[in-house]
Amino acid sequence: MQFTTRPTLQGTFGMVSTTHWLASQSAMAVLEDGGNAFDAAVAGAFVLHVVEPHLNGPAGEVPILLAPAGGAVRVLCGQGVAPAGAAPAHYRRLGLDLVPGTGPLAAAVPGAFDAWLLLLRDHGTKSLDDVLAYAIGYAEHGHPPVENVGAAVESVRRLFETEWTSSAQVYLPDGRAPRPGTLLRNPALAATWKRLLAETAGAGGREARIDAAREVWRTGFIAEALLRQSRRPTLDTSGERHTGTLTAADLAGWSATYETPVTYDWNGWTVCKAGPWSQGPVLLQQLALLPPRLPAPGSADYVHLLIENCKLAMADREAWYGDAAEVPLADLLSDAYNAGRRALVGERASYALRPGSPGGRAPRLPAHAHAHAPAGAAAGFDPMGAGEPT
């Protein structure tokens, strides 16, 4: 007999699951107030931007899978594109052969905010004030931070104190990183959302108000702030200071879009994922690699099979996913291709990166796929550029 402290959760009204209890609680409050699942998702997402700032934010990106009642599954792409000026030639002129891992040169067009608002406009029922109220409250009045927030801030303390000083004002207000038992506030974010609501208050109905907010993000005071930050020379992992390539035209010209999901039928289910821009189809290929009969769940053979399949699918991701050319998904998910790939799984773990040749194409791996840490290098990632893998 097996015992667990995690019981099966069931409900007759609605359920919410997020990575932070305050976001789940906020989203559930929206449902209890008569909102639908899309309203709840948007409210919860904006709370996550406050309580898990080390993991996501409104200037990040988001892939959204949605299934409206009685409608087809759709993908909402909240992955912003690279700025028009972020061409290889630009980085080479700067003496760089890789895009720095931090700093404005690494920034794409922000996508999350527009995607969440597009979801709210097209599928939600609540007003912009309603869904932002929870995030504004926690940002303005504070919330108890989880330990990982403090650990993440400590890892970039020197960067915050010397380069991203406005971040230091929020996350190192007294020279100490956020810690459990205290309240973490983000008054700048609360003020931003309050100003957004004030500037769009006269826009008209619910949908017009949401579109007005999207326009403020792209061309208004928020866009201006994003551009000021991009134009400020900032130290990055190259060890030098650079400005970004983001322009007003980049911000104004992009918006989130709807797409058809990539699907794979497995064991009586149709599994849906966002496109290869999200790396989601890697999971579908792992399903395609499974043999008709699986070893006993939890056994050593079962774990070995799943891990080796994951390695093969990830190797194909490294060789074939990108936006410079069409990704051969039909071949990558085909039965014939995966039967051949499945035969590569032996009794021992493989240490090789082994991409395949879908449709007879020759795989091409980026240089970073062969990166290694030099002997004696310190463990971990240094945002100031020291000890980067070569």
Image (spheres, grey):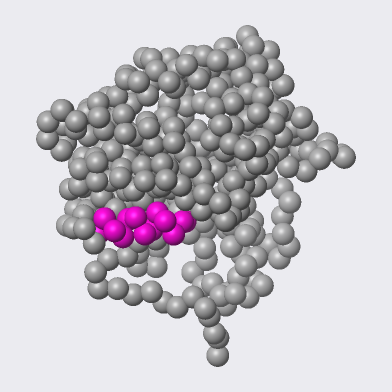
Residue found farthest to the top: 93
Q: Nearer the viewer, residue 158 or 302?
A: 158
Q: Nearer the viewer, residue 133 or 286?
A: 133
Residue found farthest to the left: 205
Figure quadrant of residue 362: top right
Visible residue check, residue 254 = no
| Relative image position of residue 147 (x, y in whole percent) | 60, 53
Figure quadrant of residue 204: top left
Judge whether 226 appears above or below 45 on screen.
above
Residue found farthest to the right: 376
Figure quadrant of residue 375: top right
Residue in the image at 43% along x and 26% along y: 109
Q: Is residue 203 left or right of residue 168?
A: left
**SS majority, magenta:** helix
Q: Quadrant of the N terminus?
A: bottom right
Q: Is residue 374 left or right of residue 96?
A: right
Judge whether 342 appears above or below 322 on screen.
below
Residue in the image at 26% along x and 51% along y: 38
Q: Quadrant of the C terminus?
A: top right
Residue in the image at 63% along x and 23% along y: 163
Q: Nearer the viewer, residue 41 or 98?
A: 41
Q: Is residue 181 left or right of residue 10?
A: right
Visible residue check, residue 22 = yes
Judge whether 91 appears above or below 362 on screen.
above
Magenta stretch: includes residue 360:
no
Residue in the image at 21% along x and 55% along y: 35
| Relative image position of residue 101 (x, y in whole percent) | 62, 30
Magenta segment:
19-31
Q: Is residue 315 left or right of residue 279?
A: right
| Relative image position of residue 60 (x, y in whole percent) | 45, 35
